[in-house]
Image (cartoon, grey):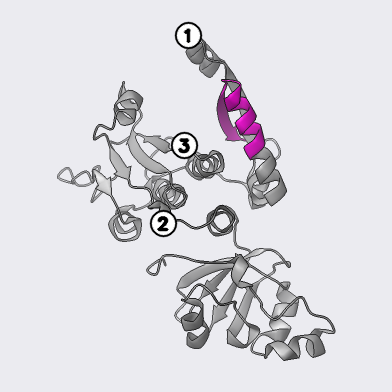
Amino acid sequence: MRAWEDALAAHGIVAAQVLLTHADIASRRRYLNARDAFDALLSLGAVPVVNENDTVAVAEIRYGDNDNLSADVATLIGAELLVLLTDIAGLYAADPRVDPEAKLIPLVRDIEREAVPVAGGSGSSVGTGGMVTKVEAARKATGGGVEVVIADGRVAGTFPRVAAGESVGTRFVAVPAESRIAARKHWIAWTLKPEGTLTVDDGARTALASGTRSLLPSGVRTIAGAFRRGSAVRCVDPAGVEFARGLAAYDADDARKIAGKKSAEIEPTLGYTFGDALVHKDDLVLLPADRS
């Protein structure tokens, strides 16, 4: 923090330390409070310097890498640009440390088809985030309308060049405004950590594809995980491909009891009801069709 304070002070800018855990982002109330805090700091002209609050974070609520933390913060504050710095020039078609002929990919418009297949694993000895986490962060941020650039942090002048629109590193194009999901659904899909998995049949998968249907218990084959009512869950098809995420209307034990049953059988089975759906359409978000 002293390094940030000294560097920014040279430009007459005040640095403000902000420590977050994933729990701060996963709680909707705390998420909104964090957004208000950032808005207040920025309105005062301070530059927030964000890091994970390691002193209180535990394994279940840890980010573990600054890439995903930065993507969540970028969408939280409505940033225009997220720059992820690493120790190579950007995303390559192959690992440049193995293949010296590997080509840098300067522009990515479709993350699923162009970036995910070539992201590889974590190979850097610096930090805990490799190219996989940077591509995952880019998926999150661009889905919220934030443009992303992955560039070499060791090269002087990177930020001014990126801000000027020069071709530096790999630039990920933000999803067009008309294709973006609402802020709350973006939070459900990309911020919350799923605690369970619902495997649905082909009929339910087809019905949900319209984006206007709830997931009814009759279309659910199996339940995995130990989740509570209101927890985030994955929805996968019979082949195990994840196609949606949502908030569970029932906890895992109750979900297992009503899986495969008609909605009218929920109350007779449980003795109470929280509605006809296991995941209501307002709490359900469809993911890119080829996500796996």
Q: Is residue 251 left or right of residue 16?
A: right
> Which residue is depicted at the point 47% across and 71% down?
243
Distance between the Cα atoms at labels 2 and 3?
36 Å
Q: CA distance from mark 1 to mark 2?
A: 41 Å
Residue range in magenta is: 35-53
**41 is within the stretch colored magenta:** yes
Q: Is residue 123 magenta?
A: no
SS of the residue under disc 2: helix
Q: Which residue is mark 3?
A: 127
- Which residue is denoted by mark 2 in the rendering? 178
Which of pointers 2 and 3 indicates the residue nearer the eye?
2
Q: Name the foreground residue: 198 vs 29.
A: 29
Q: Is residue 6 above or below residue 146?
A: above
In space, the residues marked 1 and 3 are separated at their CA atoms by 27 Å
Tell me what residue is drawn at x 34 percent, y 53 percent. Answer: 120
- Vertical side of 212 occupied by 99: above or below: above
Other-residue count near label 3 (Cα within 10 Å), few / some / many at <14 / 14–19 / ≥20:
few
Q: Amino acid at mark 1?
A: Ala
Q: Report which residue position mark 1 lands on.
A: 10
First in residue order: circle 1 vs circle 2: 1
The location of residue 178, given as percent across then percent down, is 41, 56
